[in-house]
Image: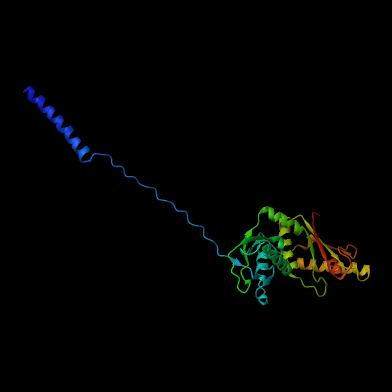
Amino acid sequence: MKHFFIAFVLFCTWFYFGFQYYECKVKNLCEDTMVVVEEPKVIAPKPVEKPLTFLPFSIQKNMDIVSIIDSTSNPLQTYFDYLNKHQKEELVITSFFSKAENGTIALSRSESVKKKLADFGINTDRVIFQTKQSDITFENDTYVNGFAYEYQTMSDERIQAIDKGIASKILYAGFGSKTFKPDNTLKAYAQELKSFLVKHPTKHVEIIGHTDSNGEAEANMWFGKQRAKSVMDYFIAQDIDASRLRITSKGETAPIAPNTREGQRLNRRIEINVTDN
């Protein structure tokens, strides 16, 4: 009986380990099954490129000639109005040039555009120019999308630099008291000055009238003051506080150019200085 029991235990032990061996080694049923889950690959979306918007100027192949497109529709008014309304923004213009052109020609074209904007009355202190080579296809040596643009908010440093120009300004216009009509330069400056004075509530504005040397000195002193008054009245009409404005005249006594026809035009001017008192 004792031998039978020992044999039975040995048989059970053999059976257990044999079964385990069969299950694990032969059938591979007892191996740990590890499911490897791969993390999903994150594909960064490509940045959406903003479609380019172009200024209404065409360019000529290998030339710095810039021509405004459809001048009868007054296409620059939109940019003038936008910058006047958004005093913290500036216009960024990209001047394109083809692979067959020298990059310096894009700089010359930028200067041409800058002059046209300034002539229209846009403050080019708030315009930034940059150049870029592009796959340009000229048709009959002309390309109509030579200048892309966008608006951007100015940095504090840019605003401070522009404020210096606002605080000291020279204006040229028809300042006659009876026929006075503000041009775009004066209109734009009035909006910039109004915004500037809101930021600096303790400052005041001195408007100085200047004339050329034609006529009597006493009469020129009077004309200078009348021209300054015309500008002051316009500022007041644009909701600038009259108590922060004062006028004076220097007549013909402070010329900035010789007494030629062009020099006389430059001497007939309004000088504006923003002061602390």
Tell me the residue at 86%/68% (across/down): 264
For this rendering, which residue is in front, 84 or 137?
137
Considering every residue shown, the one lying at the far front of the view is 100
- Residue 155 visible: yes
Q: Is residue 82 left or right of residue 49?
A: right
Tell me which residue sits at (75%, 56%) in the image: 164
**In the figure, is residue 14 to the left or right of 257?**
left
Q: Is residue 136 left or right of residue 250?
A: left
Q: Position of residue 57 (x, y in %)?
A: 65, 70
Whether 91 is drawn above or below 29: the answer is below
Q: Can residue 239 be seen at all in this image of the molecule?
A: no
Displayed quadrant of residue 72? bottom right
State the residue lying farthest toward the left. Answer: 1
Quadrant for the N terminus in the image: top left
Say if 78 sits above or below 44 in the image.
Answer: below
Which residue shows up at 69% across the image and 55% down it?
A: 158
Identify the image quadrant of residue 6.
Answer: top left
User: Where residue 234 sits in the image (x, y, percent)?
Assistant: 77, 68
The x, y position of residue 141, in whole percent, is 63, 72
For the C terminus, the quadrant is bottom right
Q: Looking at the picture, how far across and down is residue 77, in whole percent?
A: 67, 71
